[in-house]
Amino acid sequence: MLTAIIDYESGNLHSAEKAFQRMAAEVHGGEVVVTSDADVVAKADRLVLPGDGAFPACAAELRGHKGIYDAMVEAVEVKGRPFLGICVGMQLMASRGHEYELTQGLGWIEGDVEKIAPSDVSLKVPHMGWNNLVIDHPHALLDGIKSGDHTYFVHSYQFHVTKPEERLAHVDYGGDVTAIIGRDTMVGMQFHPEKSQDIGLRMIGNFLKWAP
Amino acid sequence: MLKTRIIPCLDVADGRVVKGVNFVGLRDAGDPVEAARAYDAAGADEICFLDIHATHDNRGVMIDMVQRTAEQCFVPLTVGGGVRTVADVRKLLLAGADKVSFNSAAVANPDVIAEAAAQFGSQCIVCAIDAKTIGHDENGVPNKWGIFTHGGRKEALDKDGNPIDAVEFAKLVVAKGAGEILLTSMDRDGTKAGFNLPLTKAISDAVNVPVIASGGVGTLDHLVEGVTEGGASAVLAASIFHFGEYTVQEAKQHMHDAGIPMRLT
């Protein structure tokens, strides 16, 4: 089993790599590599798309790495390989992003990524820190995880899903903020599992064991 | 609901913890990586490394330390001290830092915040402000603060030679793209007399990004006040944790009991 963490020059992959490798060793999840090689992406059994920064910049970087982009889209859309998007990597799964300018996403989960606008104006943006999950729909990635468990968020834009069944978990921040999305072989997490101590590591382990 | 964060801060020089850390069971209390691991295990919400010498000569040591920490600690890590350029930010992020903090360089040139935020996103750009009281109201309550740089040794002045107002400066760096303010009171730092609450309140009311209160913590009630009276989103402390006076869990429980939403692990 080979898990590829896709490096399209968007942000820090060092801690993600170490967290996935640690859990791969623990759950016998095979090999984990960080790669910008389209051939490795094409042959990987599982894909992880991280991302830090602005939606348009990340989308442009990803599409600019045409070989990786094509291999990733084929692996997910045609071959049905398990896919995990993290933070902006999750937001890129949307139909559209509205950060700075309107940007087309991958269109895998119908919805829009828009600025967080808490109903309580005293709440600060970015939404930064630990928030407790409310599970909307059970999922293999949430094995051993319960509503009330905390994960670490740092973001200013949020994913509004069109189909409620594709929102697997949310948190409260002056209203519902989407935390986990998914359908078929793809999932996305707004928070950073690689920075969420035991709870995050458990979800990473669950992803590495997931056989949808 | 979002929880208030407790952030233990490690002052580091040449790859060693200064002021020392007095934990039970540490093989090497001077090793920042060991100390960070202990805080991670203790349930710290984030960890902060501050390079207090911050000369270019020891950058390599800092990078290596951040890298080793990120391999073993799965908790957010902020790194500051001697960060001058966008290239410095990039190196630290690639090594595994989650957030990077500007201080003196942002006072000299606030546009460096804009450049770094445009490239890496506001979420990972922190501006550390070291503020000192320079004015009081008629009741003797502090109501004006200047900015100090170079580890608090140098008062920052504008081009006309006047003090730079800390509240105005905070608004400026947030407008430039800073995603968080690490606010240290130079009056209180090291005194154990509690945060400078009027300062903390003035800054947190003036900006819409999270403010981390720092400088002066001596008791667990000080942590509570920083949030309830100062309006801080997070509290940073060093010595009360390093010397084993309180554990992170005791601090969290105390704040929770005072009605502040905390992550109790």
Image (spheres, coloured by chain):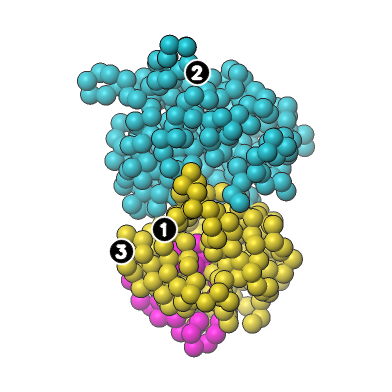
Mark 2 lies on residue: B187
Quarter of the image for the N terminus of chain A: give it: bottom right
Residue B5 in percent (x, y) is at: 60, 42
Residue A135 in percent (x, y) is at: 66, 66
- Tell me if residue B10 can be seen: no
Q: Residue B164 appears in which quarter of the rendering?
A: top left
- Relative placement, left or right, of A138 versus B56 is right
Which label is found at residue A101? Answer: 3
Amino acid carrying label 1: it is Lys
Labels 3 and 2 in the same subunit: no
Residue B84 in percent (x, y) is at: 36, 38
Labels 2 and 1 in the same subunit: no
- Crowding at dot 3, Cα within 10 Å, few <14 / some 14-19 / many 20+, comes out as few
- Crowding at dot 2, Cα within 10 Å, few <14 / some 14-19 / many 20+, comes out as some
- Relative placement, left or right, of B204 versus A32 is left
Amino acid carrying label 2: it is Asp
Chain drawn cyan, letter?
B
Mark 1 lies on residue: A115
**Shade of chain A as shown in the rendered figure:** yellow
Examine the rendered structure and indicate whether residue B134 appears above or below residue A117.
above
Name the residue at the left extreme. Answer: B160
State the extent of the magenta-drawn residues as a range.
A63-91
Identity of the residue drawn at 32% across and 67% down: A102
Estimate the spatial distance between the alpha carbons at disc 2 and disc 1, rounded to whole Å: 38 Å
Q: Nearer the viewer, residue A35 or A132?
A: A132
